[in-house]
């Protein structure tokens, strides 16, 4: 619904999307909710390790998707390569080619915020179906971390905004880090401790954790391959090379 409503209100709107590696986003979201007692998903994850949560939540999400599957439009030959077919990954959206099954799948992902929100293609496709690339800019968190000033200038140019005199030291800092979750807290990258050093039962033994990561990576792979196709077709900007290495 949202892209349709936005286009109706402002047909010339400019939209920016910032994407993070989906596996990293899912793990970060899990840790965030586990460490913040007042956050909405805290009770859901409080008694879980990441491994146990992957086991429980992924099963629930896949069951939801299975219930949606019978409502998808038939036509295996028209499925994109990302899903095992041969067709281009043409974006579809609500009111722009999305069938009932796809809409139901979107609801599944929407309601499973820790893992489901990392399935980017169905949400991004909803916007690409209604807006041309000239009105939708996709950025990546790797860019913000590695070349922050260049990324900010790209965003300004896209919006048609005047270049701002940023504090170059401030833009290299890390905000909302694990042990200082606040926009007023800026830390150097070297001051942020590795996730494994935090304890609190967040990470179990390496073998089980690696298996959970591998399972989630496989789950995200079809969605990521759809993004790769869109990048290759010029619908979105090139994705980070590391993403292709992980999910390709």
Image (cartoon, rainbow, N blue to C red):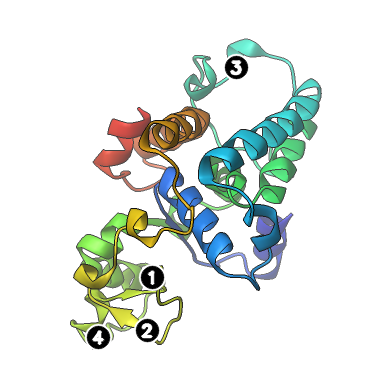
Question: Mark 3 sits on what residue?
Answer: 78
Q: How far across and how far down the image is residue 40, in percent? A: 68, 65
Residue tagged 2: 185
User: Who is closer to the viewer here, 50 or 94?
Assistant: 50
Assign the C terminus to one quadrant of the image.
top left
**Mark 4 secondary-structure assignment:** loop
Q: Are marks 2 and 1 in contact (CB under 8 Å)?
A: yes
Secondary structure of residue under mark 2? loop
Disc nearer the start of the sequence (4/2):
4
Query: Which element type, helix, strand or loop, lies under badge 3?
Result: helix
| Left or right of 70 in this view: 136 | left
Front of the two marks 3 and 4: 4
What residue is shown at x 33% (from left), y 33% (from top)? 246
Q: Looking at the image, is mark 1 or mark 3 nearer the viewer?
A: 1
Are discs 1 and 3 less than 8 Å apart at CB? Answer: no
Provide residue 25's location: percent of width, then percent of height. Answer: 46, 52
Judge whether residue 188 can be spotted in this image.
yes
Q: Which sits earlier in the primary sequence, circle 2 or circle 1?
A: 1
The Cα–Cα distance between marks 1 and 3, rounded to whole angstroms, is 43 Å
Q: Which residue is mark 1?
A: 177
Examine the rendered structure and indicate whether residue 42 appears above or below residue 71.
below
Find the distance from the CA under tag 3 to the CA under tag 4: 47 Å
The span from disc 4 to disc 2 (Cα, nearest Å) is 17 Å
Closer to viewer: mark 4 or mark 2:
2
Q: Residue furthest top?
A: 77
Which residue lies at the image location 66% right of the left edge and 64% below the top edge?
6
Q: Earlier in the sequence, mark 2 or mark 3?
A: 3
Residue at image point 53% right, 40% down = 121
């Amino acid at each position: 619904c949202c892209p349709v409503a936005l286009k109706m209100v402002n047909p010339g709107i400019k939209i920016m999307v910032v994407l993070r590696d989906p596996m990293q986003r899912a793990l970060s979201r899990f840790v965030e909710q586990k460490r913040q007692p007042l956050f909405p998903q805290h009770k859901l994850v409080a008694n879980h390790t990441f491994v146990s949560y992957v086991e429980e939540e992924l099963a629930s999400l896949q069951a939801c998707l299975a219930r949606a599957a019978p409502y998808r439009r038939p036509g295996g030959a028209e499925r994109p390569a990302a899903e095992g077919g041969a067709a281009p990954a043409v974006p579809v959206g609500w009111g722009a080619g999305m069938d009932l099954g796809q809409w139901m799948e979107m609801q599944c992902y929407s309601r499973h915020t820790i893992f489901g929100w990392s399935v980017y293609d169905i949400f991004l496709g909803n916007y690409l179906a209604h807006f041309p690339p000239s009105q939708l800019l996709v950025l990546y968190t790797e860019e913000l971390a590695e070349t922050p000033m260049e990324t900010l200038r790209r965003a300004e140019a896209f919006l048609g905004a005047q270049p701002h005199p940023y504090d170059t030291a401030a833009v290299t800092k890390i905000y909302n880090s694990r042990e200082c979750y606040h926009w007023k807290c800026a830390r150097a990258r070297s001051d942020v401790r590795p996730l494994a050093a935090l304890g609190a039962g967040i990470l179990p033994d390496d073998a089980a954790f690696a298996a959970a990561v591998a399972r989630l990576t496989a789950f995200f792979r079809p969605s990521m391959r759809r993004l790769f196709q869109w990048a290759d077709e010029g619908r979105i900007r090139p994705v980070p090379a590391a993403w292709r290495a992980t999910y390709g």
